[in-house]
Image: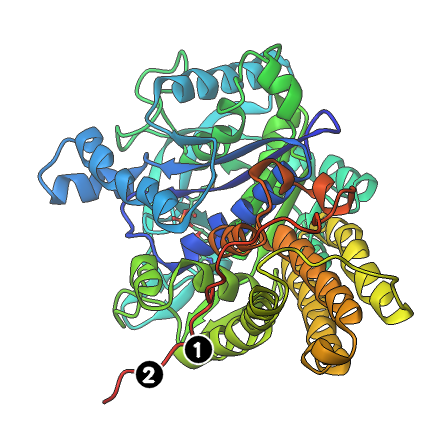
Amino acid sequence: MAAVPDAFYITTPIYYVNDVPHIGHAYTTLACDVMARFHRLDGKRVMFLTGTDEHGQKVEKSAQAAGMDPLVFCDKVSRNFRDLSSLLGFSNNDFIRTTEERHTVACQALWRAVIASGNNDIYLGKYAGWYSVRDEAFYGEDELIESPKGKLAPSGAPVEWVEEPSYFFRLSAWRDRLLAYYDSHPDFILPAARRNEVVSFVKSGLRDLSLSRTSFKWGIPVPDAPGHIMYVWFDALTNYVTAVGYPDTGTASFKTFWPALHVVGKDILRFHAVYWPAFLMAAGVEPPARVFAHGWWTIEGQKMSKSLGNFIAPSALVGKYGLDAVRYFLMRELPFGADGDYSHRAMVGRLNGDLANDLGNLVQRVLSFVAKNCGAKVPSPGTLTTDDDRLLDASETLLDRARALIDRQELHLVLEEIWRVIGDANRYVDAQAPWALRKSDPLRMATVLYVLAETIRRIAILVQPFMPTAAGRILDQLAVPGDRRTFTALVDAPALVPGVALPKPEGVFPRYVEAAA
Ligand code: ME8
């Protein structure tokens, strides 16, 4: 997902500044963080971008309501999203704001490049139609829902009739070229079910797209067209190329990283998989490498909404369950791509089951046994049996399985595979019963404990992208040096070195206990 094989470029949507960040936003950025960390540990040069979408009528109105200048308003609220990175341990390399000068330059250059291609993809017309300020989108009459309060967009947002001169993008002319592109790039849109939805939408015919507005001011001016402000999606989507140096496509950054993997929620797939590749192709720029659309979280069975007041602030979750548990839960609970529900019960189930019981207990019982019975040093193994080899093979081959899954963004399956090996390791402890070998066969006991410690080392290295802090603490307890925590170190010799002194073990995943009522 980049121009060169050892590079990786991943992006989140840029979030509307006037919303308060909630678990939905945290989810998308977290998934990107996991992939970014995975590829860094795998030795790639990674560019991981997130940021805020700061233009449009909605922001202009919110700033007015707050009695603030729009830029001052944006400076204040975009910080809420920037702060998410430190709260949730996101490792983004850049944070883009669409109000930055570099972005104005990129948007205007992309616009000019479409004009310069000479294909009349942008033309001046008159827009008359239904517009939803809340969705920042135009709708056709046939898409609207009648309600006692008047016409509504499919999202339930109110719409208003708008008539004004507007530049248009000739999207109607792109149907066949887009279909040909999807055909020749079968994995351009994932998961496959979402791809099919986009293909049938495009097949049914595309309407030209209004690209500019004259009725508000808070946006990027259309070049050489006084009074026209860019339609928010042309502006917003361009952020992905701004951040790697567009319009200078000769920079090392553009040449290394573009095209990107865009991760988005299913709500904005159409903008990314239809409009965006068309804009880029019209400007002579390569389309993105892939658009992956994930599913939608509900909260305790209900849609998140302002009226229900059930938005969950990521800080509240981290405060209650701890950062690693929240990161694990979000990545494990839903197949990445599917919809799902957040509930306290499900969170506690994962925390106490997968983390405290499965991984936490494995680490704790093995390391405390080593501390007590092997002089607090990495034990020296004797000859390996087939059972030992089987467990070591399972953890060694895990990396290749994880790589294949990450390449298709099947993040939950990576965790499932890791937890399968954790299950194997726990069964191995029970079957080999090292405590029973202490007196009868200390060499075999040392071998069993070595195999287990080495398995834990590999698991912890692979868990790092998901739970960097907890995985780091496990690796600390195994005295694995900082430069031996990459994926190369996972399979390369030397593995754990017998005789190396180990620090005092301590529990990594405390059980969650309900506070007394
Ligand atoms: O659409 N479940 O910004 P936005 C899962 N600025 N993900 C969710 C979610 C939920 N309940 N709620 C939000 C915009 N998200 C534009 C994007 S990109 C060039 C411009 C996540 O602030 C999900 O990733 O409304 C969704 O696509 C995104 O937040 C929408 O963020």
Q: Circle 1 sits in a helix, a strand or a loop, which is it?
A: helix
> Along the line of sight, which residue is nearer the eye, 485 or 294?
485
**Would you say residue 223 is visible in this rendering?**
yes
Task: Name which residue type carries label 2.
Answer: Glu
Write down the residue under mark 1: 348
Dots 1 and 2: beta carbons under 8 Å? yes
Q: Circle 2 sits in a helix, a strand or a loop, which is it?
A: loop
Q: Earlier in the sequence, mark 1 or mark 2?
A: 1
Does residue 280 sit above or below 413 in this rendering? above
Extreme residue in the right direction: 386
> Along the line of sight, which residue is nearer the eye, 288 or 22?
22
* Image point (41%, 17%), residue name: 102
Q: Quadrant of residue 98?
A: top left
The quadrant of the image that shows the C terminus is bottom left
Mark 2 CB lies closer than 8 A to ligand 1: no
Extreme residue in the left direction: 67
> Along the line of sight, which residue is nearer the eye, 398 or 10?
398
Does residue 304 sit above or below 113 in this rendering? below
- The color scheme shown is rainbow
Does residue 322 sit above or below 254 in this rendering? below
Residue 15: x %, y % from top left: 39, 44
Residue 514: mark in rendering: 2
**In the displayed structure, does residue 41 sit left or right of residue 163?**
right
Residue 487: x %, y % from top left: 70, 43
Task: Name which residue type carries label 1.
Answer: Val
Mark 1 CB lies closer than 8 A to ligand 1: no
* Image point (46%, 68%), residue name: 509
